């Protein structure tokens, strides 16, 4: 992961963890940054999914205080991002694992 993306994710994490209430938009932006972490670090997917569930539960204009489990998940991400030098060793093949299509759909224009 480029250092700029790591710093952006760290800043967004800090903003969300220090806020009394978070909006759906701020959680979605944070999740966008953390998606790269979940790709590079497969164990992060479970933590990502739980935060995603919190974001999905919010209404369009909703603001909510993050519950303790969600805060703990974000603290886990913060700890992982502090070890950013480990992300430079992730093989490109991790990103290239594409499955072959099972069904082909042909349409007339």
Image (cartoon, rainbow, N blue to C red):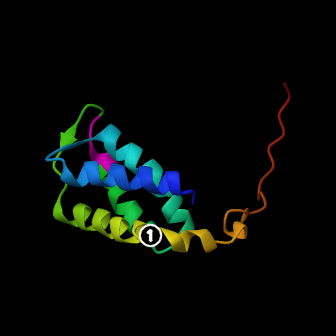
The residue nearer to you, when weighing 53 against 87, is: 87
Position above or below: 73 against 61: below
- Identify the magenta region: 55-59
Q: In percent of the image, x 18 and y 47: which residue is there?
A: 19
Asked whether the viewer can see residue 41, the reply is: no
Q: Secondary structure at mark 1?
A: helix
Q: In percent of the image, x 84 and y 40: which residue is there?
A: 106
Residue, disc 1: 44
Q: Quadrant of residue 17?
A: bottom left
Position above or below: 68 against 56: below
Q: What type of secondary structure mainly makes up the magenta span? A: helix
Q: Residue furthest top?
A: 109
Q: In percent of the image, x 19 and y 52: which residue is there?
A: 18
The residue nearer to you, when weighing 60 against 70, is: 70
Side of 31 where 89 appears, left or right: right
**Residue 39, x across and y down, in percent:** 56, 64
In magenta segment, residue 58: yes
Q: Residues within 10 Å of mark 1 (few under 14, many from 20)?
A: some
Instruction: Indicate the quadrant containing the C terminus: top left, top right, bottom left or bottom right.
Output: top right
**Residue 75, x across and y down, in percent:** 28, 66
**Residue 42, x across and y down, in percent:** 52, 72
Q: Quadrant of residue 98?
A: bottom right
**Residue 65, x across and y down, in percent:** 16, 49
In magenta segment, residue 19: no
Instruction: Indicate the quadrant containing the N terminus: top left, top right, bottom left or bottom right.
Output: bottom right
Side of 83 where 91 appears, left or right: right
């Amino acid at each position: 992961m480029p250092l700029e993306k790591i710093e952006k994710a760290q800043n967004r994490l800090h903003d969300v963890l220090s806020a009394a209430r978070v909006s759906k938009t701020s959680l979605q932006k944070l999740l966008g940054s953390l998606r790269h972490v979940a790709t590079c670090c497969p164990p992060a997917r479970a933590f990502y999914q739980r935060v995603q569930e919190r974001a999905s539960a919010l209404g369009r204009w909703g603001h909510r205080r993050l519950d303790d489990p969600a805060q703990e998940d974000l603290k886990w991400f913060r700890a992982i991002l502090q070890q950013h030098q480990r992300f430079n060793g992730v093989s490109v093949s991790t990103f290239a694992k594409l499955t072959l299509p099972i069904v082909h759909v042909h349409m007339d224009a």
